[in-house]
Image (cartoon, helix red, strand yellow):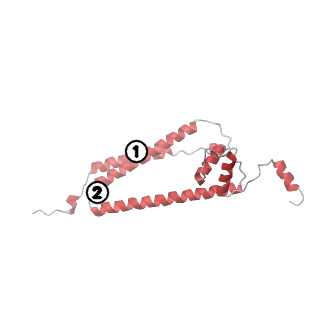
Amino acid sequence: MPVLHTASLRMENPELAVVGLTCNVVGVFFLANSIRFREPRRALADALGVSARSLLKVRDTALNNMQVMLGFLFLTTGFLLQIVAKWDMALTTLLLCAGIIAFAAAVYAVGAYSSRRAFRRLLCEFFQTEEWSFQDDMELTKEIGEVLGVPLAKDMTVEVYVHQVRQALGVQNQPKASTPAERARRIALPGR
């Protein structure tokens, strides 16, 4: 009776490994191509709000998002093909891989939760130190309310919703933003 060696149970498929590596190269190309570095002058103009308006930025963003998705799809496919090409069909290998995937999912869940909390905290810190007219940009106010979990009812007035968003941010009702001359006059008054 012939003795089976563990090497004979191993599934070696160099073709799958080569196809997997090719997928990885294509995926890396898409990911690298999606990273666009802006010219410093353009970045400064964007930051100061003086750049020319253009739809090219929106088009480029859509293209970059598509390239990132394609890149990750090709990379994942390539790595999975390499795994299949080298897999020895052992139960311990399967359990180890499942454990790694479960650990990665847990780390992702913790990271997503903590990043949302950190973002909420940063929002609160920002709006507690800056004067902001929430009524002037209701779309942004609604986004902030969504992030903070402030419910929006159809029969709710703007003032009530803004008040609830301010409360969620820990912002007291601030007076409307005044001009520099009004601020200077208030500072110059005796007893202030």
- Between 46 and 42, the one nearer to me in the picture: 46
Residue ranking furthest to the front: 155
4 over 181 or under it: above or below: below
Residue 32 x %, y %: 47, 46
Residue ranking furthest to the right: 190
- Between 111 and 22, the one nearer to me in the picture: 111
Residue depicted at x 51% and y 46%: 35
Residue 144 x %, y %: 62, 50
Query: Image quadrant of residue 26?
Result: top left
* Tally of marks: 2
99 over 31 or under it: above or below: below
- Residue tagged 2: 87
* Distance CA(mark 2)–CA(mark 1): 23 Å
**Which type of secondary structure does the marked residue at label 2 adopt?**
loop
Left or right, 96 with respect to 174, comes to left
Q: For label 2, count other residues whose C-alpha is less than 10 Å away and answer few (under 14), some (14-19) or many (20+).
A: some
Residue depicted at x 28% and y 48%: 15
- Residue tagged 1: 26
Residue depicted at x 27% and y 51%: 14
Residue 89 x %, y %: 26, 58
Query: Image quadrant of residue 121?
Result: bottom right
Task: Mark 2 vs mark 1: give the one in front.
Answer: 2
Quarter of the picture holding the C terminus: bottom right
